[in-house]
């Protein structure tokens, strides 16, 4: 009955060492109000000086989404007052942003879809309000941290599409290395603009902004709740009174949204050009910045060069750390299919709770050593799983020392294998006759018996080689 219209505004903190308009550090987790200066505090006479590295990172993002990079862009004053904004205005870009237009592609339900990006502009972050039982505090360490605000077109039609778009955007930002995009620390957060309309209509109805969402799960829950709230109001005839242009907050406990304030129009911000900053003019060197290989390009290369299946390739590009882990394995000349299996399935299966590929107890070097020992026949695949589980819990052990500790080294000695093979064939003379008469499937039976007698320590390749010779 209804079509959902969603547009997203993403604020990502750029990972510059200093703030956008001063030399204060942008480090996270410091004591309150230590990374501040007259500019951060808006003291009289303090003037902003633009951080060139923030410009470079914005240009990199623009190139990654096939956008127009405006050679000349302008900073404006966006006037509003909150306790964590001591100037009572924010320096931001408005009518002439540094990045204009652009696109990225998502895949939901097996279908590719283009999502337009209206703009990406630079601005400064505000500080942080800390509310306690009887009073509030203001920490201005974050004030002045460079932000890139990325505004999508209203092209998204479901919470699933919104989450797919955000995950794709998050991945691009991480692969570009322009932000750590840590959602828990607030360096990648989202405002969702949500509205509905009867299917078949083209006009846009009242949109509601849900502010400061910082997890993919809560973004999905917030959008779904808001769609349901608006749909119910429409069906009950209360849409015009209940759905107004406003900013709402999402309650992560009861998974509902509530009204925060009326939504301002751009005129209420009284934008005008920032008088303390000249227009930004990019030189040719800045415009010719080279960007690294992006997730989609990596996926195509993994499929083409390493024969990786599409589903596995998507797992490998799911994060920058996962991609780096895989590439460090194949750079050693290891079998790519083994690398994929042991990374995507075996190691990832052990990473639970707070553990991820970023803080895995088993490093890429150690997993590579394990795969190398499988390839050279030192241990079997079955034994390798036992070794991996052991070094996962005992990080001080190397792969070789773990193999010795667990006594899992394969026997490749021809004499030992030949002796057992002869005994198995002698004990199963009737089956040997059947095999020679054409019952080829019995070969697996003989292999199994030899491995059993060798207590799983024989090298399977050697067993196969010797058995074939003995059976003629």
Image: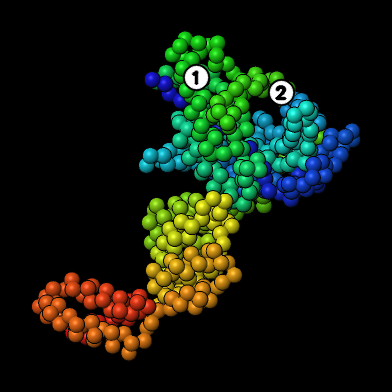
Local packing at callout 2 (Cα closer than 10 Å; few below 14, some 14-19, many 20+) is some
Mark seen at residue 114: none
Residue 323 x %, y %:
51, 57
Q: Residue at left 70%, top 20%? A: 268
| Left or right position of 160 against 290 | left
Q: Residue at left 75%, top 31%? A: 132
- Which residue is outermost to the left? 437
| Left or right position of 383 against 451 | right
- Say which of 468 and 209 sits in front: 468
Quadrant of the rendered structure where residue 210 is?
Answer: top right
Assign a secondary structure to mark 2: helix
- Which residue is outermost to the right? 45
Residue 317 x %, y %:
49, 53
- Say which of 131 and 138 sits in front: 131
Assign a secondary structure to mark 1: helix
Quadrant of the rendered structure where residue 375 is?
Answer: bottom left
Q: Earlier in the sequence, mark 2 or mark 1?
A: 1
Between label 2 and label 1, give the one nearer the viewer: 1
Quadrant of the rendered structure where residue 254 is?
Answer: top right
Residue 176 x %, y %:
59, 51
| Left or right position of 124 against 459 | right
* Residue holding disc 1: 230
- Does residue 163 appear in the picture of this structure? yes
Specify the quadrant that holds the C terminus.
Answer: bottom left
Mark seen at residue 269: 2
- Which residue is outermost to the bottom? 415
Q: Residue at left 81%, top 38%? A: 40
Residue 287 x %, y %:
64, 48
């Amino acid at each position: 009955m209804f079509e959902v219209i969603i547009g997203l505004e993403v604020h990502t903190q750029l990972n510059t060492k200093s703030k956008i308009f001063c030399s204060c550090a942008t480090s996270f987790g410091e004591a309150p109000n230590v990374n501040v200066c007259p500019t951060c505090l808006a003291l009289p006479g303090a003037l902003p000086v633009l951080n060139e590295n923030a410009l470079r990172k914005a240009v990199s993002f623009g190139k990654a989404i096939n956008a127009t990079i405006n050679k000349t862009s302008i900073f404006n004053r966006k006037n509003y007052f909150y306790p964590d904004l001591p100037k009572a205005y924010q320096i931001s870009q408005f009518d002439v942003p540094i990045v204009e237009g652009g696109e990225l592609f998502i895949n939901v339900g097996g279908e590719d879809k283009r999502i337009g990006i209206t703009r990406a502009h630079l601005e400064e972050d505000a500080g942080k309000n800390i509310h306690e039982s009887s009073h509030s505090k203001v920490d201005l360490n974050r004030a002045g941290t460079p932000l890139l605000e990325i505004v999508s077109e209203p092209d998204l039609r479901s919470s699933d599409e919104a989450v797919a778009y955000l995950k794709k955007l998050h991945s691009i930002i991480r692969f570009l290395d322009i932000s750590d995009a840590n959602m828990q620390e607030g360096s990648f957060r989202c405002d969702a603009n949500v509205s509905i309309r009867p299917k078949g209509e083209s006009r846009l109805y009242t949109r509601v902004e849900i502010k400061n969402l910082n997890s993919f799960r809560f973004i999905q829950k917030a959008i779904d709740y808001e769609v349901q709230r608006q749909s119910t109001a429409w069906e009950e005839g209360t849409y015009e009174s209940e759905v107004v242009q406003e900013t709402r907050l999402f309650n992560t406990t009861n998974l509902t949204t509530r009204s925060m304030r009326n939504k301002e129009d751009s005129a209420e911000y009284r934008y005008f050009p920032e008088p303390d900053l000249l227009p930004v003019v990019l030189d040719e060197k800045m415009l010719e910045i080279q960007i690294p290989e992006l997730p989609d390009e990596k996926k195509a290369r993994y499929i083409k060069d390493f024969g990786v299946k599409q589903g596995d390739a998507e797992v490998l590009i799911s994060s920058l750390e996962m991609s780096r882990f895989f590439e460090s394995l194949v750079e050693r000349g290891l079998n790519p299919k083994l690398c994929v299996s042991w990374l995507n399935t075996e190691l990832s299966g052990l990473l639970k709770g707070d553990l991820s590929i970023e803080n895995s107890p088993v490093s890429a070097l150690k997993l590579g050593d394990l795969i190398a020992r499988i390839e050279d026949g030192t241990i079997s695949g079955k034994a390798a799983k036992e070794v991996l589980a052991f070094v996962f819990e005992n990080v001080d052990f190397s792969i070789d020392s773990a193999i010795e500790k667990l006594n899992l080294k394969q026997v490749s000695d021809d004499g030992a294998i030949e002796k057992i093979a002869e005994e198995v064939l002698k004990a199963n003379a009737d089956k040997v006759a059947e095999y020679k008469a054409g019952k080829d499937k019995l070969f697996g039976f003989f292999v199994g018996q030899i491995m059993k007698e060798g207590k799983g320590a024989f090298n399977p390749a050697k067993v196969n080689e010797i058995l074939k010779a003995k059976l003629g």
